[in-house]
Amino acid sequence: MLSGMLVWGGAGWLLDRWLETRVFTLVGVLLGLGVAIYLVVVKYGAVEPPSGARPHTRTTPGGQRSSPRTQGPTQKGQR
């Protein structure tokens, strides 16, 4: 992440010196940080939701999902 901020911040700094402004350094640093965070999320993926938030699905030995079994009605305290 640091390299993205340095590269794009440096490009913004050079652009600021060329155009005699003071805006593009900050824009370059923020752009580099945003792109770096995006690339980390793409590479490592999003965080899995907690186990209770997703319905339980079974997988077959071949890795395909099977439909959940339906059981008869249960009484309180029994499964």
Image (cartoon, rainbow, N blue to C red):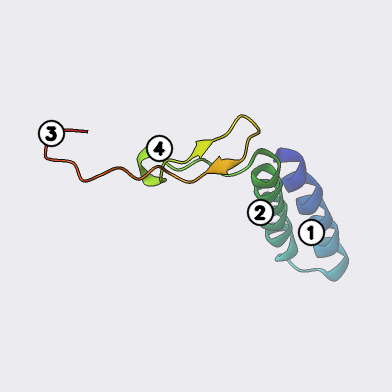
What residue is shown with label 1?
12
Which quadrant holds the C terminus? top left
Badge 1: residue crowd in 10 Å (few <14, some 14–19, many ≥20): many
Query: Hey, what amino acid is under mark 1?
Result: Gly
Mark 2 or mark 1: name the one nearer the start of the chain.
1
Q: State the separation of the CA atoms marked 3 and 1.
A: 65 Å
Q: Position of residue 53 (x, y in %)?
A: 38, 45
Query: Hey, what amino acid is under mark 2?
Result: Gly
Badge 3: residue crowd in 10 Å (few <14, some 14–19, many ≥20): few
Please give left or right for residue 71 compared with residue 63 in the image: left
Above or below for 29 versus 74: below
Q: State the separation of the CA atoms marked 4 and 2.
A: 29 Å
Please give left or right for residue 76 compared with residue 66 in the image: left
Q: Residue at horizontal 83%, vertical 55%?
A: 11
Q: Residue at horizontal 63%, vertical 35%?
A: 63
Q: Position of residue 6 (x, y in %)?
A: 76, 45
Name the front one of labels 4 and 3: 3
Q: State the separation of the CA atoms marked 4 and 1.
A: 44 Å
